[in-house]
Image: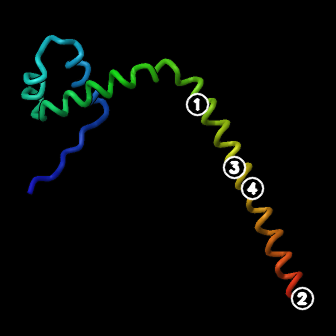
Amino acid sequence: MSKRRTHSPEFKAKVAMEAISGRKTIQEIAAGHAIHPIQVSQWKRQLLDGASELFGRGKKTKDKDEGQAKEAELFQQIGRLQMELEWLKKKSQLL
């Protein structure tokens, strides 16, 4: 049984850009890089679908940072509430 090969993101981008350029057919590109033609088509589609994200990264990182800050704040609040709950449980057992 053969093992799966993993390709670097740089290699995938190179192959996808080659496919987008249209100088060679997908079959020729696949044969030249010893990969399956379907893989070339998938990488090409991924590149085309993700191209719009390249120009919107600034906004997404800001939103991501805000989300992480909010998440950290919520985890702190959960921790405080759990401590209070444990304290109340111990207090009620003593009575």
Under tag 3, what secondary structure? helix
| Residue 61: quarter of image | top right
Query: On the rendered image, what quadrant is the N terminus found in?
Result: bottom left
For disc 4, the marked residue is 76
Crowd class of label 3 (few under 14; some 14 to 19; many from 20; radius 10 Å): few
| Residue 25: quarter of image | top left
Query: On the rendered image, what quadrant is the C terminus found in?
Result: bottom right
Residue at mark 3 to residue at mark 1: CA–CA distance: 16 Å
Q: Is residue 84 above or below residue 53?
A: below
Q: Is residue 50 above or below residue 21?
A: below
Q: Is residue 36 left or right of residue 51?
A: left
Please tell me which of labels 2 and 4 falls first in the chain: 4
Determine contact: label 1, label 2, CB under 8 Å: no
Inspect the image, locate mark 3, and give the three-letter code of the amino acid beneath it: Ala
Please tell me which of labels 1 and 2 falls first in the chain: 1
Q: Residue at x 33, y 24 (%)?
A: 47
Q: Residue at x 63, y 29 (%)?
A: 62
| Residue 88: quarter of image | bottom right
Q: Tell me, for residue 61, which label it has, or none.
A: 1
Please tell me which of labels 3 and 1 falls first in the chain: 1
Residue with the most extreme bottom position: 94
Q: Tell me, for residue 72, which label it has, or none.
A: 3
Under tag 4, what secondary structure? helix
Q: Residue at x 22, y 12 (%)?
A: 21
Q: Name the mark nearer the viewer: 2 or 4.
A: 2
Under tag 2, what secondary structure? helix
Residue 26's spot in the image, x, y percent? 13, 22
Crowd class of label 2 (few under 14; some 14 to 19; many from 20; radius 10 Å): few
Q: Tell me, for residue 95, which label it has, or none.
A: none
Determine contact: label 2, label 4, CB under 8 Å: no
Residue at mark 2 to residue at mark 4: CA–CA distance: 28 Å
Please tell me which of labels 1 and 4 falls first in the chain: 1
